[in-house]
Amino acid sequence: MSAMKLISAVKLKRAQDLLMAYRPYSDAYQDTTMNVAKRCDSESHPLLRKSDDPKKLHLVFITSDRGLCGSFNSSLIRKLETYLVTDTKTYDEVTFSFLGRRGKEHFGKEGFKVANSYIGITDRNYNEISEKVSEQLTKEFIKGDSDEVILVYNYFKSALTQEITYEKVLPIEADSDTEDDSQIDYLYEPTKKGILSELLPKYVQVRVQRAIQESMTSEHASRMTAMENATNNANDVIKNLTLLYNKTRQAMITTELMDIVNGTEALSKGDE
């Protein structure tokens, strides 16, 4: 457990560095996309299409492949179970894409429709997988097979804190509380349609990749903390068992000494 803690600490440092470097880019890309989306109507691009009565929900559920990471997976699964009961009643169909084995093992047996499943996601292949997932999501949305797409994952706040997040990525909607309320449009080069066709699909890929990175970093942090707690608990158990063993051993020695002393006294009295 101590070795696993050290390994997780090294992986956490690497994952956290990648995440901290990617966050400014993803945030800037999101701001740019929201500003452009705010200046476009829903007919400008299929990814801006907003259904008045959404009936098909696609959930991208991101968990880990392995356990031994505390409540990282179990908390996420319990929250999603509650969400499915309380927040999906208006949908006629719920489809899953699983990124990670734990989510698939739990919800895959409950009869939900599964679009895709990916395991073995690491810091070496997450970019490729995010491209595949985002491409599948955009194609499905454009075809009308889904009305909304929501990412469900653990957001990394610190090594001790991860926050369960539900992020709607499709349709692409500008927030009503964005700072830039100007109605002045941009100048698009070469064309507005060409810019949107490149910007909007890439936005989905950026958000999926960001979610995967957040989840991987949270997993390493949770596993490091879990292994540290397990190591401390094991040390406490060893200490308590050692103390109990020493007390029991001392009691046995004392009992044996008392028997020897009593026997010696009995022999000496018999000789008299």
Image (cartoon, rainbow, N blue to C red):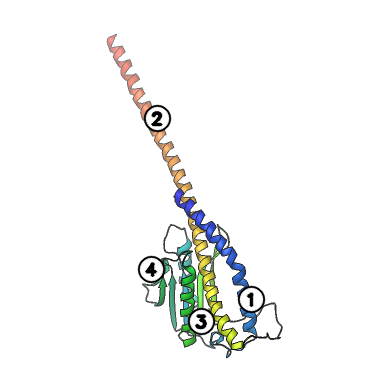
Sequence order check, earlier mark of 1 and 3 = 1
Question: Looking at the figure, which quarter contains the C terminus?
Answer: top left
Q: Residue at x 51, y 54 (%)?
A: 10
Q: Are marks 4 and 1 in contact (CB under 8 Å)?
A: no
Mark 3 or mark 2, which is nearer to you? 3
Sequence order check, earlier mark of 3 and 2 = 3
On residue 148, the disc is: 3
Question: Which residue position is annotated with label 1?
Answer: 31
Sequence order check, earlier mark of 3 and 4 = 4
Mark 1 or mark 3, which is nearer to you? 1
**Residue type (three-letter) at the residue carrying disc 1:** Asp
**Residue type (three-letter) at the residue carrying disc 3:** Glu
Which quadrant of the figure has residue 40?
Answer: bottom right
Dot 2 falls on a residue whose secondary structure is: helix
Horizontally, is 170 left or right of 38 in the view?
Answer: left
Which quadrant of the figure has residue 118?
Answer: bottom left
Q: CA distance from mark 3 to mark 2?
A: 70 Å
Q: CA distance from mark 4 to mark 1?
A: 36 Å
Horizontally, is 44 left or right of 74 in the view?
Answer: right
Image coordinates for residue 3, horizontal then vertical, percent: 45, 49
Q: CA distance from mark 1 to mark 2?
A: 71 Å
Question: Which residue position is annotated with label 4?
Answer: 105
Q: Residue at x 46, y 75 (%)?
A: 132
Question: Which residue position is annotated with label 2?
Answer: 250
Q: Are marks 3 and 2 in contact (CB under 8 Å)?
A: no
Q: CA distance from mark 3 to mark 4?
A: 24 Å
Q: Are marks 4 and 2 in contact (CB under 8 Å)?
A: no
Q: Are marks 1 and 2 in contact (CB under 8 Å)?
A: no
**Residue type (three-letter) at the residue carrying disc 4:** Glu
Mark 4 or mark 2, which is nearer to you? 4
